[in-house]
Amino acid sequence: MAGIEMEKLMELNTLVFSSLEFLFRYLPLFLLLFFAVPDRFKLFVLFSGSIVFYALGDPQYVFLLLGMALVNYLFGRTVGKGAKRWMAAAVACNVGLLVYFKLSNAFDASFLLPVGISFYTFKSLSYLADVYRKKIPEERSFLRLAAYLCMFPQIVSGPIMRYEDALKGLTCETYRLTRVEDGLKYLVAGLAAKVLIADRLGILWNDVQTVG
């Protein structure tokens, strides 16, 4: 994860998808609540659940995450009209914030970047670029866009999903218990790949850097 040493990441147990805290506490509670509420409230549960997930691991930057979601929502409402100056301002705002934290981390080894800042910055820029180029309409619902930008399965380690690909799911009309089995298969396969391959390679890479 960008800007966070593996030792520090392991301390943020809730943000590690292979942790017992996530698998046996957070995830079951989230899924129970998500499927228990009516469809019209599912988007709110996804958004609020993502914020709680982020706050459990990196609480000091929750308002930064929310602030960037609001700023990029407002930028989306303006760049959709084809205003080049607003698109330039949006890029400068997002990239400038990312560069600030990257430089702070480079000059101060004890300074930790906000968790997932690279991912939600580039997700924001991807959304704004598609709106500017008229590939997708501007999102008028702040809740829907914020749920996309803050979505907890992706905010920690990606991948960066384009907004048009996420939009169908964000309408919250396709969630059915019959699809849970397929979702669990992907979860188990991804978890196995992370624990057995990715985590081992991460430890090896840290050892190589330490020796170097």
Image (tube, rainbow, N blue to C red):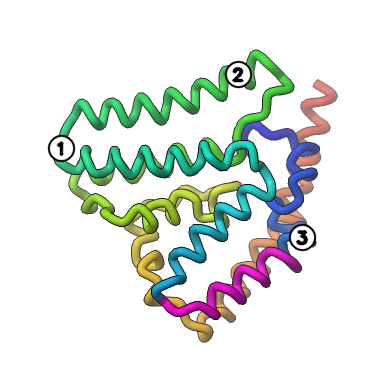
Q: Which residue is mark 1?
A: 82
Q: Which residue is mark 2?
A: 104
User: Could you tell which of marks 1 and 3 lies nearer the N-terminus?
Assistant: 3
Q: Main secondary structure of the magenta part?
A: helix
Camera-nearest residue between 9 and 144:
144
Q: Is residue 78 left or right of residue 116?
A: left
Residue 14 x, y percent position in the rendering: 71, 53
Q: Is residue 129 left or right of residue 146?
A: left
Q: CA distance from mark 2 to mark 3?
A: 31 Å
Hey, what amino acid is under mark 3?
Glu
Q: Amino acid at mark 2?
A: Ser
Position of 182 relative to 142 (above/below): below
Q: Is residue 69 left or right of residue 130?
A: right
Q: Quadrant of the C terminus?
A: top right
Amino acid tagged 1? Gly
Dot 1 crowding, Cα within 10 Å, few <14, some 14–19, many 20+: few
> Does residue 75 show up magenta in the picture?
no
The residue tagged 3 is 21
Residue drawn where x is 47% and y is 82% of the image: 176
Say which label, 2 or 1, has the lower sequence index: 1
Part of the protein shown in magenta? 24-39
Q: Quadrant of the N terminus?
A: top right
| Residue 58 appears in the rendering | yes
Picture coordinates of residue 65, whole percent (x, y): 51, 41
Element on which disc 1 rests:
loop
Sequence order check, earlier mark of 2 and 3? 3
